[in-house]
Image: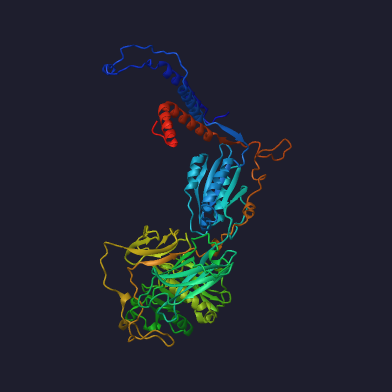
């Protein structure tokens, strides 16, 4: 029998030591005496016994010798060999996406995946190496090329489920890179195979899939939005619930405003369908809510129902809650400086919670009090000294700190757009034609939002010294953009970014997505309180930085962002943000809807610069909520065939590629479990022999009580 640690058999040297204890021990003859009175006065042996005694038969001695032999064998770790079922270098990929929290298997899919991996690793050949990757939104290596299975088990146990919409493709590409280090490698993927988008390309090793999960029954909240009503006095919530199972379901949708139940509805959900719900007046106009929470709960059973819809399975609970931040109704003032464009003025008039003022370029100056505005728009003109407020420049005529004008573009075409840019959300520019635009070199501080010919920007945005700035290089009236739906949407997106709408995300953030948080003026940074009560403090990377990036958005719920005050800064008097209506500038031009200087004070809730700002992190991913187990063959086909995965495994005499099976070491099954059981049995037997008198008395006492007699 082979041993992992044969030197441990040296423990058998304790066998003669046990024998010597029995040979050398002092022995006395047993005798019955009438009294021990005289014996108590003896404090030392008065009779010398011979140290070496004849070895007598003793069951206790035999058990102790057997225990020494068993313990020595246990330390030597005997094993048996069998053909290995895995390659010598294994890369394990464990899916940790939100769907792995489904409870259609015990205890959940992630727990079943871990157990399946540990069971599969029993086929690892002797000396095989294992790497472990946790596949969430990003791939993370938790063990790298170790042959210590103890460390591998600890790494696997440390993996926890996330609420992310996992990206198995990134994890597989990382696994392929790790597998490429060895000529004998294999990728082991533990997943439910519910992959919406398969990765592309071919991996550098064979792929084996350990699929977990049985059922796809799930109901989920897949959309939640809260918007101001047309009156501006209340808010409405839009909710979309999906039944991703195969049976009809009945569920209760509950809407809470700041923790208070505002409305509850019972929905009958058809299988494989989405049901939309709109709830008006989610808050009290006198006490506006800041957070809306929607819960999907089990409905009360209907005795008349016979379709079992109330008992339809919902194996994934993480998508049964969603949160939304109610947009604050803070009044913002916008100044338009230009010759007058009715298209532009009309579109700006419809911006929510906004007062629009307009003046001619000749009237602009210190008397206009530009510091009292939240956004200044310059149309076809720029002042010599730019204000410190956020700026939207439209067709700047000359070079300025906003960009270098190098010429004019005639009939410029629109280049390829990045639809993930927040300024292009819901903006369709496919049918837009532009007659003329300024040719401006893209500044280093800006990103190109709408590229034109040769990379010349048609719209770019960024920050100058912490101040948000955007430049539209053409006049809207010199294009057909104002005649399309994209125009007011684009202006709304621009105003949202320039007015600070992106200080915290207005819509829900996907779990694990980094967010950019604005640093208020005079603050050292921001403090982010997570839904579990923990908090992170993010200091400005450099003095005067206007924003920081926060990446720990892995928990679902509401995040609260508050400024970190500078203790050395002295409090400043109330500034232009609180300007009264009497300090408003001159009346707006014709067509603009801003109030005059005698207008009554606005009824909007004032913005408090020191108040915490909120943003929500929600799953809201119908693909991730669709937990029906997928086809593992789709992932298996991404890997190389086993015969070609190791071209350098060796060639036969005829020049053909040989197989790896003949050269791979065998898998080992250690026999420590039966040896430990034998050791426990021997210890138990030794105790029973040593305490045989006590055991005998207990047995007689127990028998007497069973028979109903007195004590033995």
Which quarter of the picture shows residue 260?
bottom left
Q: Residue furthest front?
A: 709
Residue 92 falls left or right of residue 465: right
Q: How many marks?
A: 0
Identify the image quadrant of the N terminus.
top right
Residue 687: x and y, percent?
A: 43, 29
Q: Is residue 483 left or right of residue 358?
A: right
Residue 502 drawn at (x, y percent):
43, 69
Q: Position of residue 512 (x, y in %)?
A: 47, 59
- Residue 597 vertical placement versus 31 (above, below): below
Q: Nearer the viewer, residue 426 or 319?
A: 319
Compared with residue 16, is residue 648 higher up or lower down, i.e. above or below? below
In the rendered structure, the answer to whether residue 228 lies left or right of residue 612 reads: right
Residue occupying the point 32% across, 87% down: 598
- Residue sitting at 48 percent across and 27 percent down? 67
Residue 239, x across and y down, in percent:
49, 71
Query: 282 above or below 185?
Result: below
Residue 648: in sight, yes or no? yes
The reply to whether residue 453 is in sight is no
Q: Residue furthest right?
A: 654
Quadrant of residue 506 within the rendered picture: bottom left
Q: Out of 96 and 203, give the one closest to the viewer.
A: 96
User: Quadrant location of the C terminus?
Assistant: top left
User: Could you say which is closer to the camera, residue 606 or residue 194?
Assistant: 194
Tell me which colouring the rendered structure shows: rainbow
Give whichever of 464, 309 is nearer the camera.
309
Task: Please say if 385 is above or below 7.
Answer: below
Left or right for 120, reference 700: right
């Amino acid at each position: 029998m082979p041993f992992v640690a044969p030197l441990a058999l040296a423990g058998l040297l304790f066998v003669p030591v046990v024998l010597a204890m029995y040979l050398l021990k002092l022995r006395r003859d047993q005798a019955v005496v009438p009294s021990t009175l005289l014996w108590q006065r003896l404090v030392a042996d008065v009779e010398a016994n011979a140290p070496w005694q004849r070895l007598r038969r003793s069951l206790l001695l035999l058990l102790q010798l057997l225990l020494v032999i068993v313990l020595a064998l246990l330390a030597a770790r005997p094993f048996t060999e069998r053909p290995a079922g895995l390659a010598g270098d294994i890369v394990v990929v464990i899916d940790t996406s939100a769907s792995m929290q489904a409870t259609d298997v015990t205890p959940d899919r992630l727990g079943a995946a871990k157990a399946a991996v540990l069971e599969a690793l029993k086929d690892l050949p002797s000396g095989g190496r294992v790497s472990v990757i946790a596949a969430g939104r990003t791939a993370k290596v938790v063990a790298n090329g170790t042959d210590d299975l103890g460390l591998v088990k600890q790494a696997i146990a440390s993996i926890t489920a996330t609420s992310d919409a996992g990206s198995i493709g990134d994890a597989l590409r990382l696994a392929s890179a790790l597998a490429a280090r060895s000529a004998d490698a294999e990728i082991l993927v533990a997943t439910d195979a519910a992959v919406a988008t398969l990765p592309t390309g071919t991996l550098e090793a064979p792929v084996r899939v350990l699929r977990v999960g049985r059922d796809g029954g799930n109901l989920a909240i897949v959309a939640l939005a809260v918007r101001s009503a047309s009156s501006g006095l209340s808010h409405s919530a839009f909710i979309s619930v999906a039944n991703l199972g195969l049976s009809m379901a009945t569920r209760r949708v509950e809407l809470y405003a700041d923790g208070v139940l505002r409305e509850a509805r019972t929905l009958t959900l058809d299988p494989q369908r989405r049901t939309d719900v709109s709830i008006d007046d989610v808050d009290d106009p006198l006490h506006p809510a800041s957070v809306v929470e929607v819960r999907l709960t089990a409905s009360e059973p209907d005795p008349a129902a016979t379709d079992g819809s109330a008992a339809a399975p919902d194996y994934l609970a993480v998508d049964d809650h969603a949160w939304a931040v109610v947009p604050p109704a803070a009044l913002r003032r916008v100044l338009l400086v230009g010759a007058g464009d009715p298209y532009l003025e009309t579109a700006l008039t419809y911006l929510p919670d906004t007062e629009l003022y307009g003046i001619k370029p000749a009237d602009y100056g210190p008397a206009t009090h530009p510091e009292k505005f939240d956004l200044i728009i310059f149309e076809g003109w720029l002042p010599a000294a730019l204000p410190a407020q956020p700026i939207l420049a439209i067709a700047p005529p000359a070079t300025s700190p906003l960009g270098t004008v190098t010429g004019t573009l005639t009939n410029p075409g629109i280049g390829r757009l990045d639809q993930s840019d927040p300024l292009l959300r819901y903006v369709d520019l496919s049918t837009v034609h532009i007659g003329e635009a300024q040719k401006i070199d893209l500044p280093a501080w800006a990103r190109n939002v709408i590229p034109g010919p040769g990379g010349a920007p048609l719209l770019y945005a960024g920050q100058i010294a912490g101040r948000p700035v955007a430049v539209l290089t053409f006049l809207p009236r010199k294009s057909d953009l104002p005649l399309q739906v994209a125009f007011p949407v684009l202006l709304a997106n621009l105003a949202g970014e320039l007015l600070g709408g992106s200080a915290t995300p207005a819509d829900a953030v996907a779990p694990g997505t980094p967010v950019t948080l604005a640093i208020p003026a005079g603050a050292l940074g921001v403090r982010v309180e997570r839904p579990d009560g923990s908090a992170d403090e993010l200091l400005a990377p450099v003095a005067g930085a206007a924003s920081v990036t926060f990446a720990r958005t892995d928990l679902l719920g509401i995040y609260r962002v508050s400024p970190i005050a500078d203790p050395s800064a002295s409090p400043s008097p109330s500034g232009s943000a609180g300007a009264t209506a009497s300090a408003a500038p001159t009346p707006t031009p014709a067509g603009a809807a801003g109030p005059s200087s005698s207008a009554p004070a606005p009824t909007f809730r004032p913005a408090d610069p020191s108040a915490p700002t909120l943003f929500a992190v929600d799953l809201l991913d119908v693909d991730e909520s669709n937990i029906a187990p997928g086809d593992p063959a789709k992932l298996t086909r991404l890997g190389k065939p086993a015969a070609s995965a190791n071209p350098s495994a060796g060639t036969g005499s005829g020049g053909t590629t040989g197989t790896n099976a003949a050269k791979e070491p065998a898998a080992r099954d250690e026999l420590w479990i039966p040896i430990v059981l034998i050791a426990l049995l021997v210890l138990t037997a030794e105790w029973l022999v040593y305490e045989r008198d006590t055991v005998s008395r207990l047995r007689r006492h127990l028998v007497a009580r069973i028979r109903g007699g007195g004590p033995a």
